Image: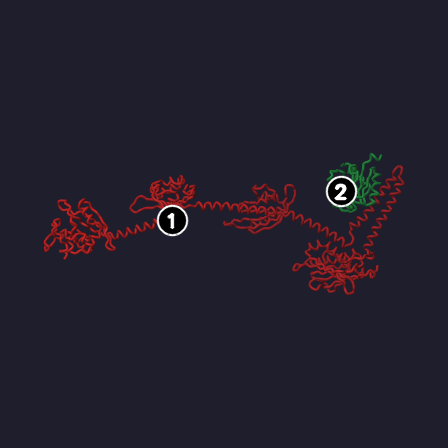
């Protein structure tokens, strides 16, 4: 069958050399036999386009049968589908130059080589068509083309500019973003050194050297920030990165350079820096103002290095030149000499344990004035475990001064109050007596001098002697008045409003009560009738009861030290005053013991207050008694008759 | 004789002092003016003429200490001898520190008065 198909000897001289008797056995080297064995489809076409020969592979591929020998290629549908095959063949025959056409058989691709068929005398008699299967190659190519297109699309879609440089750092190709960035076309940049772009901004040694290394053999590239790159959008700051590109079979390396525009980020950072700087400045200003107003300075002290940082206000408090270095020695020189040992000891103890410290001390300023300061500090260990103290120092001089002034005023008031409660001021007696005594002595001295004069001034002496007697009588009057004050029998009787007298006592003792943390509640009855009595003496009694109540509550810590003063008119038409406290109450079974002279529960008391008070009230025909309070504490009351007639002198 | 005498002024609200002191000071050789209050003294024509001021401390109205301050404000350098019936040992050094020449506690002797006034005049 194959023999018939391979009818090469049918009237075509060119192949006669191969023609043999069909029955003759062909040797293994017979060209026909070789052609039959070749897997490459081969078709031989004569000058006149008729098929002269095809091998088995061609018959299989093109579906040829022996009857197709002698047919023109036009008559074979498969060959007719090859574009302009006839024309190509005659061109090859005429020129003797090979030609190629593509041929597709379903999913197979072939390249058809059209080569001239030469006879022995170099005469071109036809063409030899060899079909090379390029399907695998074609698929690879397709894939490569596809990949390339994808990559190209990706690269052109990427917003960041990319460029490939050759070994001389000249631009090979870039993506769209790259050309757009510099406002240049592909042609304008092809082969241009990178350094020529961006107004010379890329001329950085770091960049050039790194690119050189990467183009040699390095794979490492440290990003380079390039500022002031002149682009189509003006000056930009770019970050350049680079990756080596090497191709198998190509010795020359190239480099892919990426550009990241960080101008906006830079600007935002700068703005943020500016903003946070402004915020910092503002909060620092707030802090400084707060420190100034509160007279509080702050400090930080690193124990290990003795490094001390002070706030402005602290410099002001210590009256150091602002910004000058602060040392322990300088601080100690300012601290009041009497306080230095205490402060040193406290600080050393704190440094030893890292504990917080809190103490008050004085500063002795260069002008001799004294400042009182409170220092408080918190110990803290930093990341390396080193101890540091952060603290504050407050100037409390003014507060201290007013505290002292208050204490002084209070003690003076207490003195006055104490004097009042005794009824007699020793100094006041002295004053009263010393005035006339002074007159007596002066007059007597004058008298003597007048008598000693030559001649003696008798009239003058008489006059001064008379004055001496008069002043002596005045001194005597003072003693008489004082006796009356003590006698209990002498009253300065007057109608008086007990509420008003009580209010005066409260006003007088308020400061003392406040300093003892006693709250006073007065419940004074409206329309209380006036009573007749000695105002001063009754006020002494009230004051005595108030002080006792206050003293009784000195140890009370678990409840408010409430002191109540109440006035009322009782059922027997007596004006009644009650003082209630919330102290420990009456400590004795018999309340009357309280009124025994020299009985006292106080360590510093004389024990005469209540007995004197009772005698004063009794001289007003009244009654003074003690009773337990309804709650905690004690209740002391007195009542006196309201009518004048009831008081007997 | 009187014109040549040194003027000592006495300011005291106590009448017996105002009565007795001038006679004694006269006997001691001084010319004397008495005033019952600090205000009266300041309002008088004798402020500039006074060579020594004998001044009570506790007085109604302006006290002796306030008068001393007022005189300081007026740049007057009259030496002052305070007198007081209030015996207070602490007050004397305080007054002297504040510029007083002396502080006498009533009753005082004629000799202590004389030495105080003489000391004041030496200061002046």
Residue A583, image x and y in percent?
A: 69, 60
Dot 2 alpha-carbon crowd within 10 angstroms: few under 14, some 14 to 19, many 20 or more: some
State whether residue A552 appears in this view.
no
The image quadrant that residue A4 belongs to is bottom left
Find residue A66 and name its label: none
Provide residue A498's location: percent of width, then percent of height: 77, 58
Coordinates of residue A542 in the picture (x, y in percent): 75, 58
Residue B114 visible: yes
In the visual, does B25 lie left or right of A53? right
Q: Which residue is mark 1?
A: A158
Label 1's element? Answer: loop
Q: Nearer the viewer, residue A534 or A21?
A: A21
Which label belongs to residue B67? 2
Q: Chain of mark 2?
A: B
Q: Nearer the viewer, residue A79 or A571?
A: A79
User: Within 10 Å of the Cα at label 1, are there few (<14), some (14-19), or many (20+) other Cα atoms?
Assistant: some
Q: Nearer the viewer, residue A384 or A234?
A: A234
Is residue A642 toward the left or the right of residue A241 in the image? Answer: right
Identity of the residue drawn at 78% across and 63% down: A574
Element carrying mark 2: helix
Determine contact: label 1, label 2, CB under 8 Å.
Answer: no
Colour seen for chain A: red
In the rendered image of this protein, which colour is used for chain B?
Answer: green
């Amino acid at each position: 069958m194959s023999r018939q198909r391979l009818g090469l000897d049918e009237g075509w001289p060119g192949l006669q050399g191969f023609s043999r008797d069909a029955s003759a056995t062909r040797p293994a080297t017979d060209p026909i036999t070789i052609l039959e064995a070749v897997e490459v489809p081969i078709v031989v076409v004569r000058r006149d386009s008729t098929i002269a020969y095809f091998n088995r592979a061609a018959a299989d591929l093109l579906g040829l049968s022996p009857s197709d020998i002698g047919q023109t290629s036009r008559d074979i549908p498969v060959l007719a589908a090859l574009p302009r095959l006839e024309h190509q063949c005659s061109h090859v025959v005429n020129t003797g130059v090979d030609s190629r056409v593509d041929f597709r058989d379903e999913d197979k691709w072939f390249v058809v080589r059209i080569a001239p068929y030469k006879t022995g005398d170099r005469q071109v008699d036809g063409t030899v068509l060899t079909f090379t299967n390029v399907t695998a190659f074609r698929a690879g190519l397709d894939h490569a083309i596809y990949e390339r297109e994808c990559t190209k699309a990706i690269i052109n879609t990427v917003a960041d500019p990319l460029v490939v440089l050759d070994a001389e750092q000249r631009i090979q190709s870039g993506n769209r973003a790259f050309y757009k960035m510099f406002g240049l076309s592909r042609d304008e940049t092809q082969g241009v050194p990178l350094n020529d772009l961006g107004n010379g901004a890329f001329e950085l040694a770091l960049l050039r050297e790194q690119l050189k290394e990467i183009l040699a053999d390095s794979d490492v590239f440290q990003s380079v920030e390039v500022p002031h790159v002149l682009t189509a959008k003006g000056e930009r700051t770019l970050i350049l990165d680079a990756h080596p590109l090497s191709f198998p079979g190509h010795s020359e390396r190239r480099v892919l350079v990426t550009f990241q525009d960080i101008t906006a980020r830079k600007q935002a950072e700068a703005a943020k820096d500016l903003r946070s700087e402004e915020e910092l400045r503002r909060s620092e200003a707030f802090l400084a103002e707060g420190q100034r107003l509160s007279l509080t300075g702050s400090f930080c002290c690193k124990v290990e290095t003795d490094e001390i940082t002070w706030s402005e206000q602290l410099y002001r408090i210590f009256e150091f030149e602002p910004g000058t270095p602060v040392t322990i020695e300088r601080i100690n020189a300012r601290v009041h000499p009497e306080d230095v040992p205490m402060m040193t000891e406290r600080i050393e103890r704190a440094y030893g344990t890292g504990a917080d410290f809190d103490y008050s001390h004085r500063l002795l300023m260069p002008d001799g004035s004294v400042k009182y300061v409170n220092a408080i500090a918190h110990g803290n260990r930093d990341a390396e475990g080193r101890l540091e103290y952060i603290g504050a120092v407050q100037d409390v001089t003014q507060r201290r001064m007013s505290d002292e002034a208050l204490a002084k005023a209070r003690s003076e008031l207490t003195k006055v109050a104490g004097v009042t409660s005794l009824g007699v001021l020793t100094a006041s007696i002295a004053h009263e007596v010393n005035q006339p005594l002074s007159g007596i002595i002066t007059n007597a001295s004058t008298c003597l001098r007048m008598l000693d004069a030559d001649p003696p001034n008798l009239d003058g002496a008489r006059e001064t002697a008379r004055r001496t007697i008069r002043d002596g009588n005045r001194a005597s009057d003072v003693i008489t008045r004082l006796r009356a004050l003590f006698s209990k029998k002498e009253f300065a009787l007057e109608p008086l409003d007990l509420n008003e007298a009580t209010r005066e006592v409260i006003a007088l003792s308020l400061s003392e009560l406040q300093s003892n943390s006693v709250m006073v509640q007065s419940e004074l009855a409206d329309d209380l009738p006036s009573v007749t009595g000695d105002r001063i003496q009754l006020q002494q009694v009230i004051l005595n009861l108030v002080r006792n109540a206050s003293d009784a509550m000195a140890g009370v810590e678990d409840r408010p030290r409430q002191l109540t003063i109440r006035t009322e008119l009782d059922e027997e038409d007596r004006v009644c005053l009650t003082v209630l406290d919330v102290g420990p109450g009456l400590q004795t079974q018999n309340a009357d013991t309280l009124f025994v002279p020299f009985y006292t529960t106080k360590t510093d008391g004389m024990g005469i207050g209540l007995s004197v008070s009772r005698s004063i009230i009794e001289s007003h025909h009244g009654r003074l008694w003690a009773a337990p309070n309804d709650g905690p504490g004690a209740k002391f009351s007195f009542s006196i008759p309201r009518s004048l007639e009831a008081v007997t002198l | 004789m009187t014109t040549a005498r040194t003027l000592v002024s006495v300011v005291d609200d106590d009448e017996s002092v105002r009565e007795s002191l001038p006679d004694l000071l006269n006997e001691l050789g001084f010319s004397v003016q008495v005033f019952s209050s600090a205000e009266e003294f300041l309002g008088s024509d004798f402020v500039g003429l006074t060579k020594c001021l004998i001044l009570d401390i506790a007085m109604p109205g302006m006290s002796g200490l306030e008068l001393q301050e007022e005189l300081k404000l007026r740049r007057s350098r009259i030496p002052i001898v305070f007198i007081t019936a209030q015996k207070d040992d602490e007050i004397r050094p305080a007054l002297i520190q504040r510029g007083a020449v002396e502080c006498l506690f009533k009753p005082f002797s004629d000799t202590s008065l004389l030495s105080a006034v003489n000391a004041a005049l030496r200061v002046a």
